[in-house]
Image (cartoon, rainbow, N blue to C red):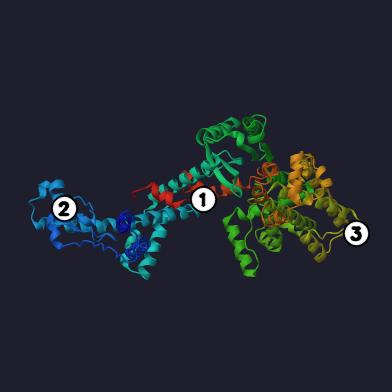
Amino acid sequence: MDHFFIKRKRNSEVKYTEACSSSTVESGIVNSDNIEKNTDSNLQTSTSFEPHFKKKKVSARRYNEDYLKYGFIKCEKPFENDRPQCVICNNILANESLKPSKLKRHLETQHAELIDKPLEYFQRKKKDIKLSTQFLSCSTAVSEKALLSSYLVAYRVAKEKIANTAAEKIILPACLDMVRTIFDDKSADKLKTIPNDNTVSLRICTIAEHLETMLITRLQSGIDFAIQLDESTDIGSCTTLLVYVRYAWQDDFLEDFLCFLNLTSHLSGLDIFTELERHIVGQYKLNWKNCKGITSDGTATMTGKHSRVIKKLLEVTNNGAVWNHCFIHREGLASREIPQNLMEVLKNAVEVVNFIKGSSLNSRLLETFCSEIGTNHTHLLYHTKIRWLSQGKILSRVYELRNEIHFFLIEKKSHLASIFEDDTWVTKLAYLTDIFSILNELSLKLQGKNSDVFQHVEHIQGFRKTLLLWQVRLKSNRPSYYMFPRFLQHIEENIINENILKEIKLEILLHLTSLSQTFNHFFPEEKFETLRENSWVKDPFAFRNPESIIELNLVPEEENELLQLSSSYTLKNDYETLSLSAFWMKVKEDFPLLSRKSVLLLLPFTTTSLCELGFSILTQLKTKERNGLNCAAAMRVALSSCVPDWNELMNRQAHPS
């Protein structure tokens, strides 16, 4: 029996010692003190049967300088200092091989042609291998950091929408100056390994490809998505189509830049549809059936009877998607209806702006004059018919500088000076300034990311009711103008004839009535019928009673889910803290029917504001000086909401350029 325990103890010691040795060889990061502690702990456990036995001492062999004549040096790697390394083949042998006989056998069997070499030969090999090891370890660390730095610089250049040459001409010299000043020249020299502008361009293309792959991989998983698309012309007269995508991912909706298409051929609906089909299906391998929403403007290019891009897109989705006419575009179309007398005032204001801004001399003279008298503003703003630039800001600047402009036009002997002497014209200008500022505020409410259709419909319906309220105020015996602050201030500070004021009031009332009619035309009530039927999506906790749930025309399974959902106080806290889309994504496991129905209703875009943002970025990237730039990659990096995986990018390129 004693013999059995002795044998078991010795086997445990040998096995555990071998395990510790192999673990050290493989990882190279195990601490020797920890090995001894683990060994002692294990030996104590293994000798618990016979405590009077002593532990067997395991001795490690030590390297001797005489072993160099066999072509072996002491390994310089961490935690492997007691292992021999061949200076010829760089192989590292086990500690047990630190015997002259085993080292000599390795030399005779592996390098027989070097048996008769003198000691000086192996000494030279020893120096070479040490220099090589130090150089490789140092250069690898520095090159990896330089590679990552070049990626980060390129990423920042693309995000800031600046020229690629900025990395070579601004960023790198500035970094060299700072490091040389704070540290030393040696540290600054390491920064010179960061690439120039040509490599920055390659880095941006690599990052763009990585971000595109990340996005498409998500969309290829079969999830539902919605798109918004719009086309425009850049500085190089190239027709460009931008497409954004919104998709359900993890805990919420994500919005990202999908593709940037150059339409070089004759612009028609077939061209746009063909390019979309080639990218979405041909290149990205996406299924149109997963597209649940398409949003665009109402131009003839998209919805005209000859092109009908939207109709073709709805056909390939098997009519499983819904088309939304951009709310901001509709709001801009509705704002164009202006009575003739007010339109003349607007045209005169635009003519004044063009007279001053159209001449650099006039613009400078007005700026100097306004600066000398200390006005709040010194510049006028250009008027444009593009719906995204507010007419309210242009008119506000003209109204605020009306006295200065009047004096300037007199000095220039312009016939336009006479319109500022007409109190009726200035009073109407004050009203137009107010109403277009209000319309601008409405446009801003319809912009932004992660907004849902319920919010936009509430803004539109609220404005329509406000128009009706203002009409009632003006029709009363004692009309009120509180909603137009500049107009109200002007008639209070200036003496306006009662008859003239009544005429102006009738024109304002006519304009408000026209606005109401056009808003009703572009935002018809029947289009919002689906939202009213699914009002529970906006606030499911407003339907706690079974009687109110029955009126929603839900199927029995959906009624049961809504009843259970509306009774949960825990989920109500989530509803109050999360966005509407994030809330319905969170409850998809417990309430799949309601969640699915809500996601399909909330997923489609309501505006094309992201595309307009993309066109603004395009004007920054593709300037007159860079009108031939292919900025698809830079647009991807600048607009993508995905964050690059730097480790994956580093692994793609084993050797930095």
Which residue is labeled 1 in the image?
Answer: 638
Contact (Cβ within 8 Å) of mark 3 with mark 2: no
Q: Nearer the viewer, residue 501 or 311?
A: 311
Q: Is residue 599 above or below residue 426?
A: above
Q: CA distance from mark 3 to mark 1?
A: 55 Å
Task: Indicate left or right for 249 with 71 as reference.
Answer: right
Q: Is residue 360 visible?
A: yes
The residue positioned 39% from the left and 59% from the top of the image is 172
Three-letter residue code for mark 3: Arg
Given this view, does label 3 or label 2 mark the residue nearer the observer? Answer: 2
Q: Nearer the viewer, residue 285 or 20?
A: 20
The residue positioned 51% from the left and 46% from the top of the image is 636
What SS does tag 1 mark?
Answer: helix
Q: Residues within 10 Å of mark 1 (few under 14, many from 20)?
A: many
> Could you say where residue 137 lies in the image, as x and y percent from the top left?
29, 57
Q: Nearer the viewer, residue 522 or 46?
A: 46
> Could you say where residue 79 lies in the image, as x and y percent from the top left?
29, 61
Q: Is residue 611 above or below residue 372?
A: above
Contact (Cβ within 8 Å) of mark 3 with mark 1: no
Query: Which quadrant: the N terminus?
Result: bottom left
Task: Indicate left or right for 410 with 170 as reference.
Answer: right
Q: CA distance from mark 1 to mark 2?
A: 62 Å
**Badge 1 or badge 2: first in the primary sequence:** 2
Q: Residues within 10 Å of mark 2 (few under 14, many from 20)?
A: some
> Could you say where residue 284 lies in the image, as x and y percent from the top left?
51, 37
Which residue is labeled 2 in the image?
Answer: 102
> Could you say where residue 365 lies in the image, as x and y percent from the top left?
60, 62
Three-letter residue code for mark 2: Lys
Which dot marks residue 478?
A: 3
